[in-house]
Amino acid sequence: MNKDVSRIIEDYASRGEVSIATLSSHSSLQILHGAKKEGFKTLLVTLASREWFYRQFDHIVDKFIVVNGWKELCTGKVLEELRRENAVMVPHGSIIEYVGLECAENIPVPYFGNRYLFRVESDQRLKMQYLVESGIKTPRIYKYGGEIDKLVIVKLPGAKGGKGYFLSRSSTHIKEKLEQMAKEGAIKSVDDVIIQEYVIGTPAYFHYFYSPVLNRVEVLGADIRYESNVDGLRRVPLKYLAEDVEPSFVVTGNLPLVVRESLLPTILEYGIKFVEYTRKQSPPGAIGPFCLESVVRDDLEIVVFEFSGRIVAGTNLYVSGSPYSYLYWDEPMSVGRRIARELKLALKAASLEKVLT
């Protein structure tokens, strides 16, 4: 761990109190709401252009840190303010996209969770390696320029909410499309993308939480992503579609999902395998929320095509708790509140270093 961050964590622990901070996007309202429910002071780093909106929720924000650009998160003034408030930053799916990997990875403010997974999440191939070596069922990966023998999905790097992803059955089509994307600056190199078997089945995004304090993996919910325009195309009769209309996969929202109970043992087993592997490969391993993004085939086999090492936007469905979080806690428990509860447990047990990096 970075020595500066280690010293800051020790300082926070000696004071016995922390505040919770995040960026104004993605799942920030849920994170702030959960923090207030658990009695923490809250800070929101927000763009000046978004401040008016988040002021509507100032009952869950104790302090606004207003910036003109996200890169200011890495400047001395903002960092000093965060440290003055004993702030723990809760990262969500927008942080790397907004401030860049180097800034996100290296800012000298403690994160709830494992900052060393950021780099893994930014590399599509490395992400798949983690899943495969965890012993989790995954789709087949194809080499660029190699033979394509079935429908594939081509994925771009980074957290872009599916923007730019496309389907193909032809290596020639893939080559032409990626070369055009490289010319337009949409990708840096064709080596940055991943070509993956398109698995037919029900999309299911499983929300987990690993508690270092309680030493258990919890299944806290599930969702289905609603994507444009692939979901919109389902409502249009085929005879009205032009031949050149291609599906796109830009996430516009999320739908709640309760899975059949017989699938839960496999879902939990996958979560445990992932945590165990990350402990070895990226110590201290997964901490707090993560998500295994999956498809359930008609034979009920669960195939995981991606993971997120942080809170995912699908958890916003369950601000009052999900059916699964109720089973663990017997009270409304969103993932945002679960993060705050873990921090509270860690403070009580004098184990803050277990949940922060």
Image: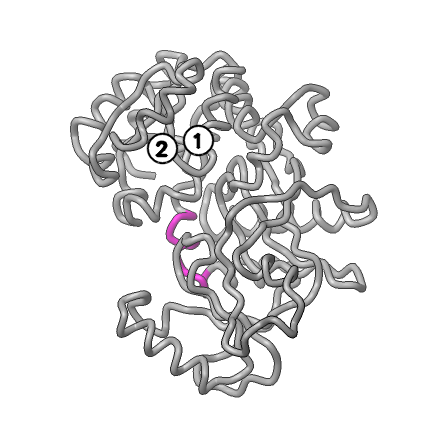
In the rendered image of this protein, does residue 266 appear above or below residue 336? Answer: below
- Camera-nearest residue between 32 and 84: 32
Q: Mark 2: which secondary structure?
A: strand
Report the magenta stretch's main SS.
helix
Q: Amino acid at mark 1?
A: Ser
Q: Is residue 280 magenta?
A: no
| In-image side of 22 versus 77 (left or right) | right
- Considering only order in the chain, which callout, 1 or 2, is on the residue closer to the N terminus? 2
- Camera-nearest residue between 269 and 260: 260
Q: Mark 1: which secondary structure?
A: helix
- At label 2, counting other C-alpha atoms closer than 10 Å, the crowd grade (few under 14, some 14-19, many 20 or more) is many
Badge 2 vs badge 1, beta-carbon distance below 8 Å: yes
Q: Quadrant of residue 61?
A: top left
- Give the residue at x 48% y 56%: 250
Of the 4 image quadrants, the one containing the C terminus is: top left
- Camera-nearest residue between 308 and 298: 298
Give the residue at the far right of this rendering.
Answer: 262
Q: Amino acid at mark 2?
A: Leu
Residue at the spot of label 2: 23
In the rendered image of this protein, does residue 59 appear above or below residue 65? Answer: above
| In-image side of 37 versus 84 (left or right) | right
What range of the chain is rendered magenta? 117-126
Residue at the spot of label 1: 28
How far across and how far down the image is residue 315, in percent? Answer: 57, 37
